[in-house]
Amino acid sequence: MHFPAEGLIASGGDLDPSTIVEAYRRGLFPWPHEGVDTLWWSPDPRAVLLEGGLHISRRFARMLRQHRFKITVDAAFERVINSCASRSDGTWITTGIINAYIRLHQLGWAHSIEVWSLENDLIGGLYGLRVGSLFGAESMFHRSNDASKVALVALTQYARHSGIKLIDVQIQSAHLRSMGICEISRISYCELAHRFTDEIE
């Protein structure tokens, strides 16, 4: 199969749970643009966090030891995805995507990490889809400094305890790079996705 450099592989289909899960198995994910929900992407290179690859700075480690946050898993999925969709810096998350991933959450495929203040305010989090031992992180948000970093650390802890071996974050950024996110070729990613999504959860 020929993959264009910009990563758009196909257009069309639907956002049914089975369609999205199968897309992840093939190394694809939905990424709406210009009002079209069913655009399927596979960037090259692909940004991933490999097992044991998380980097935590000394400053951030000191902050974590202060226990200024509370962490939950799947306690407020709809609030997390809606918070990601209403980020002030803009978002690609459409109503169709929200509804599709809420349905995936109800079926046990999609999961969220929540970061709460000690006053029980939701101040950060992320959501994504787990297929086998692959977790595709779709989006994150924060309303307090470091809350999105805390969510990523919590995701790696969740991954370690639940058998997830590969975290896909799709696109690299300076923020993610500083925490140990690396890039691999699309071919390598698709090979890993095929292997890890076939593993039993």
Image (cartoon, helix red, strand yellow):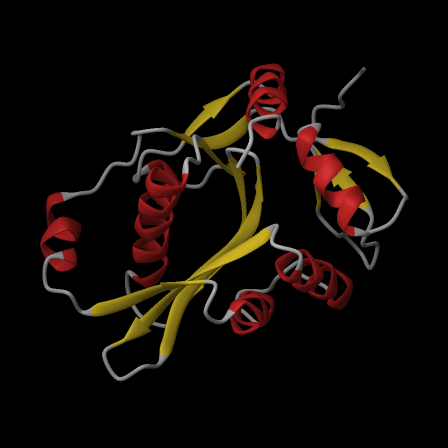
Vertical comparison of 116 with 72: above or below = below
**Which residue is most to the right?**
12
Vertical comparison of 189 with 69: above or below = above
For the point 56% across and 15% down, which residue is it? 188
Foreground of the two, 34 or 154? 154
| 31 displayed left or right of 47 | right
In percent of width and height, residue 104 lies at 67, 56
For the point 38% across and 48% down, which residue is it? 155
Residue 34 position by quadrant: bottom right
**Which residue is most to the bottom?**
119
In percent of width and height, residue 156 lies at 34, 43
In percent of width and height, residue 167 lies at 46, 36
Which quarter shows the N terminus?
top right
Count of marks, rendered view = 0
For the point 76% across and 21% down, which residue is it? 3
In percent of width and height, residue 18 lies at 78, 44
For the point 60% across and 29% down, which residue is it? 197
Foreground of the two, 76 or 38? 76
Vertical comparison of 189 with 200: above or below = above
Q: Is residue 139 visible?
A: no
Vertical comparison of 77 with 119: above or below = above
**Which residue is most to the front?**
200
Q: Is residue 53 visible?
A: yes
Foreground of the two, 188 or 143? 188
Residue 72 position by quadrant: bottom left
| 61 displayed left or right of 192 | left
